Image (cartoon, helix red, strand yellow):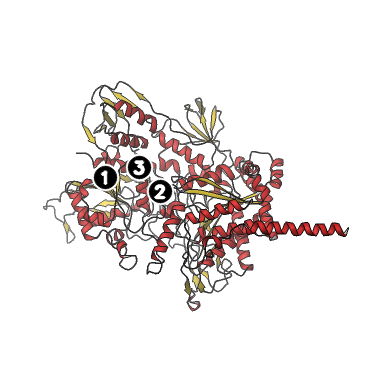
Amino acid sequence: MYLKRGFLAMLSAFCVMMVNTTFAQIPTPESHFGFQVGADYKLFNHQQQMDYFQKLDAASDRVLMKEIGKTTLGKPMVVVFISSEDNIKNLEKYRKISEDLARVRVDEATARKYSEEGKAVIWIDGGLHATERAGAQMTPELAYRVATEETSEMKKIREEVIFILMPSMNPDGLNIVESWYKKNLGTPWETTNPPWLYHHFIGHDNNRDWFMNNMPESYHVNEVLYNEWYPQIVYNQHQTSPGWARIFLPPFDNPVNPNIHPGATTGTNFVGTAMANRFALERMPGVISNHTFSMWWNGGMRTVPYFHNMIGILTETGHATPTPRFYDPDSIPKYIRGLGGSKPTDGTHIFYSDPWKGGESHFRDAVDYMITGSLAVLDLAADRKEHYLYNIYSMGKDAIEAKLLENSFAYVIPAEQFDRGEARNLVNILRQGGVEMHKATKSFMANGKQYAAGSYIAYSAQAFRPYLVDLMEKQSYPDLRISPGGPPIPPYDLAGWTLPMQMGVTVDKVMEKFTASTEEIKTREPVTAGKVSGKSGYGYSLTTNENAAIKAINFLLAKGEKVSRLAAKQGDMAAGTFVVEKSGSTDANVSEASKTYGVDFTGLAAKPAGTLKAIKLPKVGLYKTWQANMDEGWTRWLLQDYGFPLDTLHDNDVRTKDLSQYDAIIIPDQRPDGILNGYSFGFMPPEYTGGMGIDGLAAIKNYVAKGGQLITFDEASDFAVDQFGLSLRSTTNGLSPNTFFIPGSLIRTNVDTNHSLAYGVQSEVAASFNQSRAYSRVVKENEGEGGKEPSVKEAPEPPLEIVATYAKDKLLMSGWAMGQDKYIGSKAAVIKAGYGSGSIVLFAFRPQFRGQPRATYKLIFNAIYEGTME
C-alpha cells in the first residue's frame, strides 16, 4: 500500500517536472522581443510578431498557427488556434459542430447533443487600426498565458473553448506605424500618426469594408468567420476610450438595428456586463458603457456578426501610444461627454460607476486592460459554452422560421440586368458573407413573372436571414434627438446602405412560395466568358452599360487598339458605345478581353455613321495631401482596379511638375483648408507641412485654363467653386443640423443620360450622401434698390452643364434625412463647368464612396475619358 502511494507520488512529481520542462521550452514574449510587452517607448513590428507565434506554435501542442491569406501588400495573415492538446488534434470535429449549429443543419435533439459535445468558438483579435497600437502588441502575451498557465480557470478555458486569436488584421499598417514611431522617437512628433494611410488603400476605413469585402484583409477574415468557423463571440479590439475613461465596452448606445435577433443584442449586453464585473473586482477602474457606439450600422468588423446571430464585442481602450502620459487628478472633468449623453465622473452613473481618477498612464495599462477583457470573455465562454452553442442554433432556427422578421420567400436577382457584372458582384458579396445563394438552371415563374435560367435566388429561410434582409432592404433610421426639438443624434457611421440601390442591381422580393430548379453556389460566382458575335470587317462595338466594359476597354487601349465613342445614338447602339477599330491583333485582343472581363462584343461590318470621338488610355494625376485621406485611397484603389494609369501628386508635385501630361487630375473629398494649407508648421515634421499653397493652386488653374480636366469630389468641390470663382452656390453649407441633416444615406438622383458624362449610367441612381453638398447656379439679377432694371442687358449664362440633379421629391431612398426637399431637392449633384479651354467636373457627393455605389462609378470614368478626347 505504502509502495503504491510512493509510486504515485513519484509519478505525479515526474509529470509536474515534465510539464514544467515543456513550458520552460516555450519562449516568453519578453525573452523573444527583449522587452516587456507594453513597455514605455517600445513597439515590435509584424515580422517580429510572426517570429514569436511561429516559436509558440513549434513549442506547444496547444497552439496551431494557420495562414488564411495575404494582405494588400502581400504579407501573411494568420490566425492562431489555442486550446487543449486534444482539442487541437480534433479541430475539424469542433469546426463542423460549430457550422452545423450556426447554419441549423441538424434537428433539435442533435443540436442539444452538439451543444454538450462541442466547444465554444471564440474569436479575439489584435485590432485592425494600426495607430491603435496596443492591440497587436498584447496578442503574444495573451497567447502565451492561455497556452501555458495552469490555473483552474485557464485549464477550463483550454478544455471548453476553441480560441481563435488573430494577432493583427492589418500587418502592413503595423509595420508602417512601428517604423514611424521609431523614426520620430525623441522628437516633437513622437506621438503623431504617419502622414499617409496605414492601410495602403483605405486607412481607417479598413473597418468599413466588412460587407463589401473590397480588400483582401476583410475577405480573408470573413471567410473564417462566416464560411468556416462561425464563432459564437467575436471580440474586436480598438483604441481609444473616451477621454479620462480607461475602456469602453458594451452595452452599447441606441439605436439597435431591428433586423438583429434580440438574443444577439441581449447576449452582447450580458458579455459586456460580465467584462465590467471582472474589471471592477480586479480593481481596474474607468470602465464606461452606453456611450457613442451603437448597434445600428452593418459593415463593421464587430457589427456584421450581429446579423449572423453572433455576439459582437467592441472595446475601446485608452492610451494608444508607447509614450507615457500624466493626467492631473485635479483636472478630472465633471462629465465624460459623448453620444448617448454625459456620464458624471463622481461614480453616480450606472454605466460609469467606478471612475478613473487620473495620474500616471502607460502603454502597459492598455495591454493589461485588453488582456483582462479578453480573459473575461474566454472565462465566460468556458462556463457557458453549452449556452452559446445552443443559442446560435436557436437564433438561426428563428430566422429560418421567420419568427422575428417578415416571412418573405426569396429575393430573386434576374439574369436580365442593366449591368450583369454588378449583379454577379452582389451575389458574391452575399455569398462571402455566408448567405446561401442559388442559381436557376432552368427558367421559372415567381409572383407571376418569368425568370430566365441564370437568375440568382436567395431563399429567405436560412439562418443568416438577418444579414440578407439588412443588405437587400432599405434602412429607416429612427429620429433621435439630444432633446425634444433639439439637434439630431447622428448615427455611428452610416444610416443607410442598401446594396441593390447602390449597385444599380434589380432585385425582386417574392412573398409567395415558388418552385425552381437550382444549383447552390458554393464559392465565388466566377466571371463567365463574354460573347464575340457578328461580322467584324470594320471592328467591334461594346455597350457601356457594364462597369466591366471599362476594364475591357482599358485593356484594349493598353494593347494599342484604336477606340472611339459614339457621340450620338446610332440604330441599336446607344450614345457612348465603345467602337474598336480593327487592326492586326484586334481579333485576338477582343477575344481575350471578352473572356477575361465577361463582356459581349458585337462585330461591325462597316464604320458606324455619325461622329466618333477617339479616346486614348488616360493618364490620371491623383492629388494626395500629407493629411492622410481615405477618400484619396479609395479613389486610388478604384482607378487601379479598373486599369487607369495613375500618378500620385503630392503638394510639391502640383507646384513643380508639368501637369499638361495628365488627361485628368482628381482632387478627392477633403476640406478646402486641408488642400490649400495642409498641416500647420510644427504639427508634423517640416517636410509634411503645408498644402499645395498658392503656387500649387495657380498651377492647377493654369492646367485647366489650357485645356485640362479637373475632377473634384464632395467637399473638394467647394474648394473648386471658391478658388475658380465658379457661378455656383452650395445650398447646404452653414445650415444648422436642426434644419438640414443627412448622415450617410442614399439619395435619389436623376441623371441626364444624354450628356457625355452620363454614358452608360442609369437615369436614376442612389447618391451616397454623407453630410455632402448640393449646388445651385448664381446668376446676376437686374435688380437694385428694391426695383427691377428691365433696360439693362442680361448677363451671359455661366458655362455650366448640369449632368445630374437630386430628385424633386421622395429623395430619401435609404437611411435618414431631414430638410432634404427644401435644401437639395432639384439641386445640382454633378456639374461640368467651363474654365478657359478646360473643364471642371464637380461631384457634390462621393461617387466612389468606400467602393460601394457601383451605379455612379461610370460618372467618374466618363469624366476621365473625356479628358483624352481631342
Name the image quarter holding the N terminus: bottom right
Name the image quarter holding the C terminus: top left
Residue indicated by mark 3: 857
Q: Residues within 10 Å of mark 3 (few under 14, many from 20)?
A: some
Q: Earlier in the sequence, mark 1 or mark 3?
A: 1
Left or right of residue 811, residue 280 in this image: right
Q: Please tell me which residue is depicted at 21% across the width and 31% down the height of the picture.
A: 611
Q: Secondary structure at mark 1?
A: strand
- Give the image location of residue 607, x and y in percent: 23, 25
* Residue 312, disc: none
Residue indicated by mark 2: 850
Q: Earlier in the sequence, mark 2 or mark 3?
A: 2
Q: Is residue 694 visible?
A: yes
Q: Is residue 347 above or below residue 859?
A: below
What is the spatial separation of the Cα atoms under label 2 and label 3, in whole angstroms? 12 Å
| Quarter where residue 278 is shown | bottom right
Q: Nearer the viewer, mark 1 or mark 2?
A: 2
Q: Secondary structure at mark 2?
A: helix
